[in-house]
Image: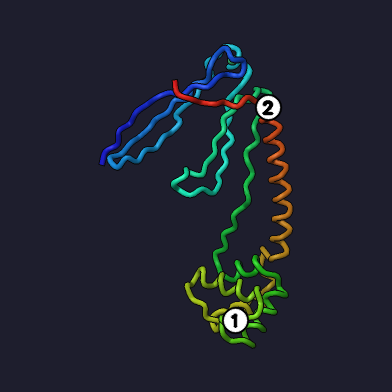
Amino acid sequence: MSWDTIHYDLFAKCACGKGKVIRHIERRDDDWNRSETYCIGEEIECSDCCNKYHIEHVIHHYYCPPWKGDGISDRAFLVPNEIKMPPRKNEHYFVFSDIDEEIVASLSLEDIKASIDDMKTNKYTTRLQLESSERIVDLYQGRYRKRNLKLITPILEDIIQNYNKYEWTHDKMIEYRHKEKEEIENNKKEIERVIEQSFELEFRRG
Ligand SMILES: [Zn+2]
């Protein structure tokens, strides 16, 4: 398999309108008609704007089916030199190495206790009464591809015994997410404020 590499430039108007901003693009095509493009550099070609502004990007990842795009929105701006675009804050993605940690983070102690009773009383996953029990079974299945209550209840009993050792309890998680949500909101506002004082670049060919 071989790649064909071509280079070309895109152009955008600068903020004052007397010059332009150039984006250098490298595109690689393979034998299967797949292509990838990369931005390999951007330059402000305007004697006024290059002293007043620098280029910054606001990159946002979002869900998008593969046939519609890559799920990345990348907006470029000429930002006045006195200010800076704050880095975008995203939700923290927790990775728990063990199933018990994941259960403790996902459900309250009361729900875990109630689920043990539910599982012992009803014995089969198809007869469970509580949403929290279903949730626990789903978490277990996600890791071990099994839905066996006989394997799950001992884990829950162990959790109750050792509840104090867990760092990320459900309550702490709720508090964390609440604070994080506020921080993300503030970060969005800060980015909006910088965007309001900046000039958005619209790149096109030739
Ligand atoms: Zn200019």
Q: From the image, tell me which residue sits under label 1.
A: 153
Q: Residue at x 62, y 21 (%)?
A: 53
Q: Residue at x 41, y 34 (%)?
A: 37
What type is the residue that disc 1 sits on? Thr
**Residue 72: x and y, percent?**
52, 41
Q: From the image, tell me which residue sits under label 2.
A: 83
Q: Quadrant of residue 122?
A: bottom right
Q: Is residue 80 left or right of residue 11?
A: right
Residue found at the far left of this picture: 1
In the image shown, does 12 or 2 lie closer to the viewer?
12
**Residue 180: x and y, percent?**
70, 51
Q: Residue at x 69, y 78 (%)?
A: 113
Label 2 element class:
loop
Q: Quadrant of residue 99?
A: bottom right
In the image shown, does 30 or 149 lie closer to the viewer?
30
Q: Earlier in the sequence, mark 1 or mark 2?
A: 2
Q: How many marks?
A: 2
Q: Is residue 205 left or right of residue 200?
A: left
Quadrant containing the C terminus is top left
Residue 80, compared with residue 156, is above or below; it is above
**Residue 87: x and y, percent?**
62, 38
In the image shown, does 85 or 20 lie closer to the viewer?
20
